[in-house]
Amino acid sequence: MATTIAISGKGGSGKTTLAAMIIRFLLAQADRKTVLAVDADPNSCLGVMLGVQPAATVADIREDARTKSPGNAGMDKVRSVEYGIQQAITEAEGFDLLTMGRPEGPSCYCAVNNMLRKFMDELSSQYQFVIIDNEAGMEHLSRRTTNNVDLLCIVAEQTSIGALTARRIFDLAKQLPIVVRKIGVIWNKSRATSPAPRVPDDERRTTSDELDGIDIFGHIPYDKAVSDASMQAKTVFDLANDSPAFSAARKIFEDILVLNSQTTNPKL
């Protein structure tokens, strides 16, 4: 069984960068991991951060399957979805990328999503890790195109708005009809570990109150190299190993994977 790690957070929080960083971290392990990267954000930026151009999207497959006239008791549609997903997988060095694409339209996609979930579960079993880059509303998870999440990392900036967003994502995750085993917040562009101005006491109290009862996985400092890489269309693999952000992220990933192994005992 794969260990599934979902990354969520509002736009601009750095969640896609963090998703790319954890993939880089896993690929750098001595016992190189098999990784499926799932870009479930309609903005579809994970491939850019990883330096990979997706061949196709699951949204295109879903739309084709929904409009396809059934034949042979629906087997044509089932085979079409299965073949389409295989074609949509983009192979890269050390990992595969699956891009979900645009959200659903107003038509009913229930039958297609049921097929997608079945094939996604079968596909996930071929990897040690599945990393899902979600949008803030986690629509991909709420549509149940996957059944279980081992770790949900909520990426947020350490502000009152960031804390409120993290709380809303946490509460939503608790309402989803899937199993989410462990949830925690990663403070990104953190002022606790960077030379930026001190967080005001009243904002710190608000942040603490909003996240009462939610685990904090760690802090990642603001790193100019990360901003520069984004501006220059570079990938996460262009960051130096000792960059402040990647160094902090690596330590967080080590800790949460140990925490996950104590809970689920996967083969890490």
Image: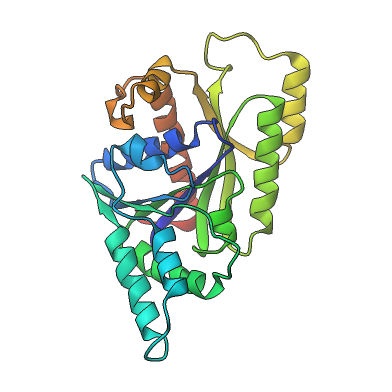
Q: Residue at x 36, y 35 (%)?
A: 49
Q: Position of residue 171 (x, y in %)?
A: 70, 49
- Determine if residue 121 is in view: no
Residue nearer the viewer, 158 or 90:
90
Could you tell whether 220 is left or right of 162 in the image?
left
- Determine if residue 63 is in view: yes
Q: Residue at x 36, y 19 (%)?
A: 243
Could you tell whether 183 is left or right of 35 in the image?
right
**Residue farthest along the bottom direction in this orientation:** 72
Q: Position of residue 220 (x, y in %)?
A: 50, 25
The quadrant holding residue 10 is top right
- How many marks can you see? 0
- Name the colouring of the figure: rainbow
The quadrant holding residue 158 is top right
Q: Position of residue 40 (x, y in %)?
A: 47, 50
Could you tell whether 113 is left or right of 10 in the image?
left
Residue nearer the viewer, 250 or 92:
92
Q: Residue at x 39, y 32 (%)?
A: 250
The quadrant holding residue 184 is top right
Residue nearer the viewer, 253 or 105:
105
Q: Position of residue 239 (x, y in %)?
A: 31, 24
Work out which quarter of the rendered image holds the N terminus and state it.
bottom left
Q: Residue at x 39, y 25 (%)?
A: 230
**Residue farthest along the left direction in this orientation:** 93
